[in-house]
């Protein structure tokens, strides 16, 4: 295994199932069991009785084996690790700068893989790839849906499947690069963006009414103004305003684990939005697919 891909020591623990106790009384396992780290006895969560936890190493090592079998150039790989809830969830962002799409997109890019997993069942094991803009810290939500390898928490993994799919990523992501170019050519007006942001991200619901969260809308339109100034009033600026929101959280307004939970929720919200019919219609995605198929 390449040294770069060594699992951090903080993630090399075993998750252990233990019974739940209340006032000194052990509760039946049919109610659930707690997941405990074997290295420091921290409780990571409560799971159903049939859940079988796996240590991160059991899934990470076959993943690395699959990536090595894929033929991808991993020599210049850079990995950014992060965890949530004392290690109950883990994330690894793997950047491969030897694969870039600068000649198509017209800016510095690289292939990035994102791995996420959990030992408490709160996240499904997921490996995906996308194009990363290197001049900013935006992660890119994929509009197409065909570069993820997903597994349930089973006892074994499938490194061969990972390797086969990962080998296709550099070519598949070229389509994304051409899509970015397409989006640059699709004009989008500020009013259109404001209506989209209002409807999809900036409404606050109460028992009696729905109202616009003006503070949040102001923030979202500020992102549009920033990217439209840099890129132009087009679909690519619109897309980048959304992915900026999806990958940045204001930590000053949240506490502890709330930051990570909010970040994950925003990322999932944006992924759903850019794959939705409304956004695809605004960027004329059908036109792009037709030209791609021709």
Image: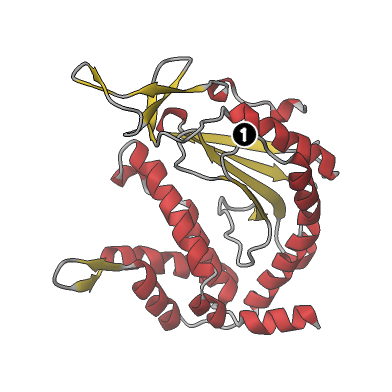
Residue 37 location in percent, x, y?
A: 45, 21
- Is 270 situated left or right of 58 in this image? left
* Front in this rendered view, residue 50 or 39: 50
- Up the image or down, 280 lies above or below 22; here it is below
Identified at 43% across, 55% down, the residue is 266
Q: Quadrant of residue 156?
A: top right
- Is 144 situated left or right of 16 in this image? right
**Quadrant of the rendering where the N terminus is positioned:** top right
Q: Residues within 10 Å of mark 1 (few under 14, many from 20)?
A: few
Q: Secondary structure at mark 1?
A: loop
For the question of whether residue 255 can be seen, the reply is: yes
Q: Quadrant of residue 4?
A: top right
Q: Quadrant of residue 210?
A: bottom left
Identified at 76% across, 49% down, the residue is 166
* Front in this rendered view, residue 161 or 97: 161
Residue 21 location in percent, x, y?
A: 27, 21
Residue located beneath label 1 in the image:
155
Residue 259 location in percent, x, y?
A: 37, 43
- Is 286 situated left or right of 293 in this image? left
- Up the image or down, 148 lies above or below 18; here it is below
Q: How is the model colour-coded?
A: secondary structure
**Quadrant of the rendering where the C terminus is positioned:** bottom right
Residue 107 location in percent, x, y?
A: 70, 61
For the question of whether residue 245 can be seen, the reply is: no
């Amino acid at each position: 295994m390449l040294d770069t891909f060594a699992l951090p020591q903080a993630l090399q623990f075993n998750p252990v199932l233990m019974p739940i106790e209340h006032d000194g009384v052990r509760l039946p396992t049919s109610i659930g069991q707690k997941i405990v780290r074997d290295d420091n006895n921290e409780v990571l969560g409560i799971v159903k009785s049939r859940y079988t936890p796996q240590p991160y190493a059991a899934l990470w090592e076959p993943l690395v084996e699959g990536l090595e079998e894929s033929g991808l150039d991993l020599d210049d790989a850079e990995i950014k690790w992060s965890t949530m809830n004392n290690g109950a969830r883990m994330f690894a962002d793997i950047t491969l700068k030897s694969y870039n799409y600068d000649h198509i997109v017209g800016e510095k890019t690289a292939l990035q893989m994102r791995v996420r997993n959990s030992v408490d069942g709160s996240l499904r094991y997921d490996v995906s790839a996308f194009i990363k803009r290197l001049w900013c810290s935006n992660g890119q939500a994929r509009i197409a849906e065909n570069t993820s390898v997903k597994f349930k928490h089973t006892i074994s993994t499938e490194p061969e499947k990972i390797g086969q799919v990962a080998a296709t990523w550099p070519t598949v992501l070229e389509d994304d690069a051409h899509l970015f170019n397409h989006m640059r050519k699709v004009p989008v007006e500020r009013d259109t963006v404001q209506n989209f942001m209002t409807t999809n991200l900036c409404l606050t619901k109460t028992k009696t009414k729905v109202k616009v969260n003006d503070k949040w809308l102001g923030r979202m339109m500020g992102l549009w103004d920033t990217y439209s100034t840099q890129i132009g009033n087009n679909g690519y600026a619109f897309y980048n305003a959304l992915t900026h929101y999806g990958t940045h959280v204001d930590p000053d307004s949240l506490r502890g684990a709330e930051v990570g939970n909010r970040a994950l929720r925003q990322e999932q919200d944006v992924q759903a939005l850019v794959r939705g019919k409304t956004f695809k219609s605004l960027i004329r995605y059908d036109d792009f697919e037709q030209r791609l198929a021709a």
